[in-house]
Image: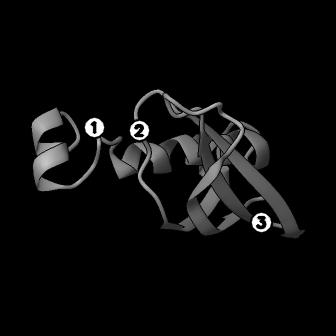
Amino acid sequence: MHSDPWFAREMAGFPKPILHGLCTYGVSGRALVAELGGGVAANITSIAARFTSPVFPGETLTTLIWRTEPGKAVYRTEASGLAGSDGSEARVVLDDGAVEYVV
């Protein structure tokens, strides 16, 4: 489902292979480290989120972050730019994200 087009289509029901969920989670984590952790991964003490939609290789991921109180924030990650679309419609791929970090 992640590398074999036939398996993705016939066995998993996707039009093509999907990105590994941990890759999506890792890209989001990198954005959180850059924005909230000052580029230092050790400054992020907790990350959580709910997977809501698959990501296809080549899509653009955007992580939206809202600080809620010192050392805490919530976030959401969206995917856009799926081949065959005009790229204007982003869909949520990680939702209900929560992160704690060293201030």
Q: At which x and y percent is residue 53?
A: 46, 59
Residue ID for mark 2:
56
Mark pair 1, 3: CA separation: 34 Å
- Which of discs 1 and 3 lies nearer the camera? The answer is 1
Residue pictured at 67% horizontal, 42% vertical: 62
Instruction: State the image quarter where residue 7 is shown.
Output: top left
Q: At which x and y percent is residue 42?
A: 60, 49
Labelled pair 1, 3 in contact (Cβ < 8 Å): no
Residue 24 in view, yes or no: yes
Q: At which x and y percent is residue 56?
A: 41, 38
Q: In the rendered structure, which disc, 1 or 3, sits on the residue that comes first in sequence?
A: 1
Residue pictured at 18% horizontal, 45% vertical: 9
Q: Which mark is residue 73?
A: 3
Residue ID for mark 1:
16
Q: Nearer the viewer, residue 100 or 88?
A: 88
- Which of discs 2 and 3 lies nearer the camera? The answer is 2
State the SS at label 2: loop
Mark pair 2, 3: CA separation: 27 Å
Q: Amino acid at mark 3?
A: Ala
Q: At which x and y percent is residue 46?
A: 58, 66
Classify residue 56 as left or right of residue 31.
Answer: left
Quarter the C terminus occupies: bottom right
Quarter the N terminus occupies: top left
Q: In the rendered structure, which disc, 1 or 2, sits on the residue that comes first in sequence?
A: 1
- Which of discs 1 and 2 lies nearer the camera? The answer is 1
Q: Amino acid at mark 1?
A: Lys
Question: 10 Å neighbourhood of mark 3: few (<14), some, or many (≥20)?
Answer: some
Q: Nearer the viewer, residue 47 or 82?
A: 82
